[in-house]
Image: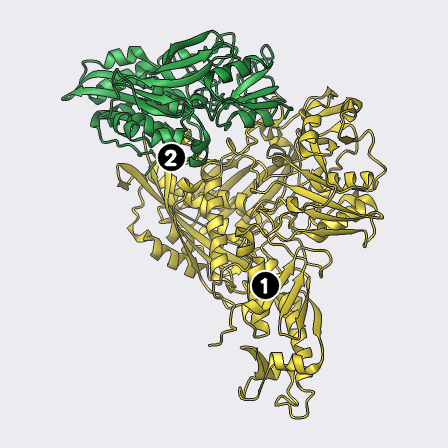
């Protein structure tokens, strides 16, 4: 770990100013990922601006019927918020499927979006990695890539975004509110994270110095027909090999609106709008689900040790769609494999 | 029944309050004054040479005390034997900072010492090192034809017995036969506590090393050999351990580094490894096994052949007993066992819970399941038809063996009779259900140990032996043995361990501590008892006049005649009226070779497992495990059960998730952290029932204990793998069984 200076910001303007005033600085929220990365010398910020105590921890109704999730509300407080449980149980499930209670108690909502990949090579400075050191090469391509991308990857990077929460968010499509040196702006969630392309060092579309202040959920929460299915190598405290977030609106057995997003398969939470269109107006049948699932993974590319994820994703989509259509899911449910 | 009858009951851990209150000090918690901190620099390449270490750049940082490497290490011992510890395998032990050559990835190549840990870590990150890289080979697959038969080398290693009968012919003529290869990757112990050594500089070249180790004397002897220290120059202490599982059997480079720095700087130094470095200190080796079996028309084994090949380093021939168990667990007249090593550019493997047996057992017990199916037999029935009453490897009867009772009791508890033989024939909750079983065998060993017992005038007994407490319950069972031997309540007894100022005990491994140290503790207490008897007989009116030691017993704080309980004295009165402030006695214990000579000494177990498999998604949930263990006498029901529960966790981990993945391009483990090296978490754990089948056995040792640290792990992995086959009809022969293998 490299030495760094540290300050605790009092409000958003102070935070933005503090960060802009220090070269090589970074915001720190819960620190559940950044501190690890600093210990591994993957991140070497010269200055940390602590934003965890900013007055952004409220979860409150929005005039348009939506719900604002403060950026510094913890993942735990968000998951167990009554409004979230009632109106956005998909988000509740996704958050609870991730990490451990201890980590969720520390991790913030803004920080969740800012998590970096869990790619083995990204974490190990003894190996080349384009995301960590642009131009050094991708060790995962041709290496061990069980947890790597099957969709939207590039020749420069096949890393995946590790968040569960963000997969649900991709389906729920909130607006990300940010503040920066040039003032406030909003970013549609689907535009927040990016694909690696030739610049895998950039995980998202935040401009230099911008700070997430809230996630504004639209009114529609798919609280009746939803599912978050996470498949992993042990039953808790493991990142997703494949996860699927589904929200449906149903008229009898007919799907009238659909949201479908995948985790563990791409550099960003992978929302497939064309699949959502395919589901609209269709009967909730195995045939429909199978067709849509095959469509989502049709362009999947395996890298060797992750080839199985194409088929696993297809099956997981079918299962999650079925679960959502049946409407049996409740907030607090977490899938534990064979149980 | 007496109140001072402690053995076999289940008292709480006597060290529990210390542990939960933070009063138990681990090796990284001895905060001696003026402590400096060392941070180890690890090689990023698997093979090559260090050309230059730019140490001066780092030495210039204020607060950095020194950078140690092969470039400036003082003269140390030259001969291999100085570096060989009690269980060093054949070959040349690794010598840290000895030469510029790099022979494995993450090899420790420098130590940066600074006034603070943070500074040492930072300085280590800045240290520039120039390398010349050579081609490496880390893939066992490339060495299939390059296996060699190792020499004896390592203590405890037994080369497989020569073939018996005519295994090839018997296989050819068998009614049914199978042949299959089984594999598992490398696994690392990963105890929660990192390897840490705090060396206290006591002046005049004298040091105390608080070291995470399973053998304080093993470390002391190593340090004396390597650094040329005298017996009185070095004391090694380890009173508590946050898990060992074999990783602390050999002196690790953390202790070498800390002692080196302390002696050179004449200052107290602490070295703590990182979690990543915990993947550079030895592991269960990547192992390939070929099993061939055939049966006679009556379902008895006609032929059994088991060959194993596993990796070792370029410099040591690490050996473990992988295949020998296959020659003794079942009755078979035609057996061929083979065992080979292959050298790779990796660090030496190291004993890891049930070393060898855990690997070989998976091959044997999955093959037994395959054989049972091929022969059309229930897997339990098949094992019963091949029950071994003698150890055919050595052609001796077992001193005791209640494996049959284990089978019966565990099967009944599990409900094995509800199982239908056909794969994919059982379902519940929309999932495929599978039931499987596996059993195992492990050595019941006793090793020379010593202990000292002291009793004060107020009746407080202290017993000491330099054994270890790696979470198994050593403090508690030794306290029970001592208290029962001298008829005292547990509260009147203190057992002290883990200090080379105490009587010598062997490394804590091999499941031999209870038998070895326990017997020494009993002997020391008996020797003290004889002294107490003599004191008690001094008064002219002693009711014990003329009694021999065998005529008396210590019970409920009294010393009395066995045949006339009214002829008694109160122990405390004897001590207080004697005028002595303290009595003490030393004793040691050795196995009784004469008594043991005609027998094979082993513990046995069986595990039954139930799994539910989501067929579409490949996810496996172990729902129930029943484990039955026959290991002689159980000293403490609670700590013994905990050991078996932990063993089941280990077996499950090996079956479903544990694997250290090597990227052969770099010759480097890629998942060397707790996020990606998966060990089971609570959500993975099934309901576990533990059954102990008591064995009366006065041949193994006077206490009748066989040890349970390893045997409980056997069978579990195979039982789960066999249950997965029963559920799905898919036979996965390469562990771990992760969901993609079932898609």
Q: Chain of mark 1?
A: B
As drawn, is B354 to the left or to the right of A334?
right
Depth check, front residue: A52 or B100: A52
> Do discs 1 and 2 belong to a common subunit?
yes
Look at the numbered discs 1 and 2 and tell me whether their residues touch, using CB distance below 8 Å: no
Let me know if residue B134 appears in the view: yes
For disc 1, the neighbor class at 10 Å (few under 14, some 14 to 19, many from 20) is many
Residue A202 at what x, y percent from top left? 50, 12
Task: Name, please, the residue furthest toward the left.
Answer: A252
Quarter of the image holding residue B277? Answer: top right
* Disc marking residue B478: 1
Residue ID for mark 2? B730
Q: In this structure image, what is the colour of chain B?
A: yellow
As drawn, is A284 to the left or to the right of A36?
left
Q: Chain of mark 2?
A: B
Q: Residue at x 58, y 40 (%)?
A: B284
As drawn, is A254 to the left or to the right of A214?
left
Q: Residue at x 57, y 27 (%)?
A: B670
Q: Is residue B161 above or below residue A176?
A: below
Residue B50 at what x, y percent from top left? 76, 24
The secondary structure type at the circle numbered 1 is helix
Quarter of the image holding residue A165? Answer: top left
As drawn, is B166 to the left or to the right of B219?
left
């Amino acid at each position: 770990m490299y030495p760094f200076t540290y300050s605790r910001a009092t409000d958003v303007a102070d935070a933005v100013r503090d960060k802009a005033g220090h070269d090589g600085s970074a915001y720190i929220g819960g620190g559940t990922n950044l501190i690890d990365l600093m210990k591994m010398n993957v991140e070497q910020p010269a200055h940390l601006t602590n934003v965890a105590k900013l007055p952004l921890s409220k979860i409150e109704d929005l005039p348009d019927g939506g719900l604002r999730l403060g950026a510094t509300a913890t993942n735990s407080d968000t998951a167990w918020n009554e409004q979230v449980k009632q109106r956005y149980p998909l988000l509740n499930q996704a958050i609870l499927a991730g990490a451990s209670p201890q980590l969720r108690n520390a991790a913030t909502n803004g920080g969740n979006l800012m998590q970096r990949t869990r790619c083995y090579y990204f974490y190990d400075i003894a190996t080349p990695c384009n995301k960590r050191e642009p131009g050094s090469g991708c060790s995962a391509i041709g290496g061990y890539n069980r947890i790597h991308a099957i969709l939207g990857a590039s020749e420069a990077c096949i890393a995946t975004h590790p968040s569960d929460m963000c997969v649900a968010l991709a389906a729920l499509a909130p607006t990300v509110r940010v503040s920066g040196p040039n003032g406030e702006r909003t970013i549609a969630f689907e535009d927040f994270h990016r694909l690696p392309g030739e610049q895998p060092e950039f995980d998202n579309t935040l401009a230099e110095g911008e700070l997430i202040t809230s996630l504004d959920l639209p009114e529609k929460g798919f609280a009746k027909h939803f599912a978050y299915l996470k498949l992993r190598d042990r039953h808790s405290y493991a990142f997703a090999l494949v996860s699927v977030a589904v929200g449906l609106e149903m008229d009898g057995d007919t799907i009238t609106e659909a949201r479908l997003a995948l985790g563990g398969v791409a550099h960003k939470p992978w929302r497939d709008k064309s699949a959502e269109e395919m589901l609209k107006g269709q009967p909730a049948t195995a045939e429909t689900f199978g067709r849509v699932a095959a469509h989502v993974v049709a362009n999947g590319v395996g890298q060797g040790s992750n080839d199985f994820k194409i088929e696993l994703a297809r099956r997981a989509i079918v299962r999650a769609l079925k679960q959502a259509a049946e409407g049996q899911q409740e907030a607090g449910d977490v899938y534990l494999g064979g149980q | 029944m007496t109140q001072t009858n402690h053995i076999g009951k289940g008292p709480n851990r006597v060290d529990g309050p210390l542990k939960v209150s933070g009063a138990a000090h681990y090796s990284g918690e001895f905060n001696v004054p003026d402590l400096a901190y060392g941070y180890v620099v690890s090689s990023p390449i698997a093979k090559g040479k260090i050309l230059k270490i730019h140490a001066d750049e780092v030495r210039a940082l204020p607060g950095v005390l020194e950078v140690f490497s092969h470039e400036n290490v003082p003269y140390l011992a030259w001969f291999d034997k100085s570096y060989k510890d009690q269980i060093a395998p054949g070959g040349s032990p690794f010598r840290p900072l000895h030469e510029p050559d790099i022979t494995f990835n993450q090899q420790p190549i420098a130590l940066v010492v600074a006034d603070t840990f943070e500074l040492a870590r930072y300085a280590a990150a800045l240290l520039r090192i120039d390398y010349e890289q050579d081609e490496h080979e880390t893939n066992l697959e490339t060495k299939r034809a390059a296996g060699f038969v190792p020499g004896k080398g390592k203590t405890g290693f037994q080369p497989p017995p020569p073939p018996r009968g005519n295994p090839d012919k018997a296989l050819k003529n068998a009614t049914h036969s199978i042949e299959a290869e089984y594999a598992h990757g490398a696994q690392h112990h990963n105890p929660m506590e990192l390897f840490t050594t705090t060396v206290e500089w006591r002046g005049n070249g004298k040091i105390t090393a608080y070291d995470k180790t399973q053998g304080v004397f093993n470390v002391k002897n190593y340090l004396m050999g390597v650094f040329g220290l005298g017996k009185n120059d070095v004391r090694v202490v380890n009173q508590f351990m946050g898990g060992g599982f074999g990783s602390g059997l050999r002196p690790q480079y953390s202790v070498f580094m800390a002692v080196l720095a302390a002696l050179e700087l004449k200052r107290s130094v602490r070295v703590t490894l990182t979690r990543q470095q915990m993947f550079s200190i030895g592991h269960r080796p990547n192992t390939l096994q070929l099993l061939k079996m055939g049966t006679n028309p009556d379902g008895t084994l006609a032929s059994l052949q088991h060959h194993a090949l596993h990796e070792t380093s370029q410099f040591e021939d690490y050996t473990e007993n992988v295949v020998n168990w296959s020659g003794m667990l079942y009755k078979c007249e035609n057996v061929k066992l083979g065992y080979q090593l292959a050298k790779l550019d990796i660090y030496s493997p190291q004993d890891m819970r049930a070393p060898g047996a855990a690997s070989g057992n998976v091959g044997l017990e999955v093959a037994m399941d395959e054989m049972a199916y091929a022969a059309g037999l229930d897997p339990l029935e098949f094992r019963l038809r091949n029950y071994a009453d003698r150890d055919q490897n050595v052609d001796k009867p077992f001193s005791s063996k209640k494996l049959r009772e284990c089978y019966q009791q565990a099967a009944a508890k599990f409900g094995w009779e509800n199982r239908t033989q056909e794969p994919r024939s059982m379902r519940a909750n929309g999932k495929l259900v599978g039931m499987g079983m596996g059993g195992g065998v492990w050595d019941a060993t006793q090793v020379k140990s010593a202990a000292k017992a002291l009793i004060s005038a107020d009746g407080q007994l202290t017993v000491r032996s330099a054994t270890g407490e790696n979470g198994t319950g050593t403090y508690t069972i030794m306290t029970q043995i001592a208290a029962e031997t001298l008829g005292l309540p547990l509260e009147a007894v203190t057992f002290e361990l883990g200090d080379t100022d105490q009587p010598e005990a062997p490394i804590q491994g091999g499941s031999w501590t209870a038998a070895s140290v326990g017997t020494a503790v009993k002997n020391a207490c008996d020797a003290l008892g004889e002294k107490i008897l003599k004191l008690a007989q001094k008064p002219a009116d002693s009711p014990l006049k003329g009694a021999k030691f065998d005529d008396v017993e210590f019970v409920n704080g009294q010393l009395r005649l066995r045949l006339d309980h009214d002829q008694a004295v109160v122990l405390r009165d004897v001590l207080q009226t004697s005028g002595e402030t303290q009595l003490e006695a030393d004793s040691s214990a050795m196995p009784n070779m004469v008594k043991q000579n005609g027998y094979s000494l082993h513990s046995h177990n069986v595990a039954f497992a139930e799994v539910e498999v989501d067929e579409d998604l490949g996810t496996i949930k172990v729902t129930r495990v029943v484990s039955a263990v026959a290991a002689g006498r159980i000293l403490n029901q609670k700590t013994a059960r905990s050991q078996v529960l932990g063993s089941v966790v280990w077996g499950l981990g090996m079956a479903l998730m544990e694997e250290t993945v090597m990227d052969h391009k770099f010759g480097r483990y890629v998942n060397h952290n707790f996020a990606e090296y998966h060990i089971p978490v609570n959500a993975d754990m099934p309901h576990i029932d533990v059954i102990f089948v008591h064995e009366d056995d006065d041949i193994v040792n006077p206490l009748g204990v066989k040890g349970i640290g390893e045997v409980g792990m056997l069978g579990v992995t195979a039982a789960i793998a066999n249950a997965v086959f029963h559920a799905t009809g898919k036979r996965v022969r390469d562990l771990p069984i992760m969901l993609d293998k079932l898609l």
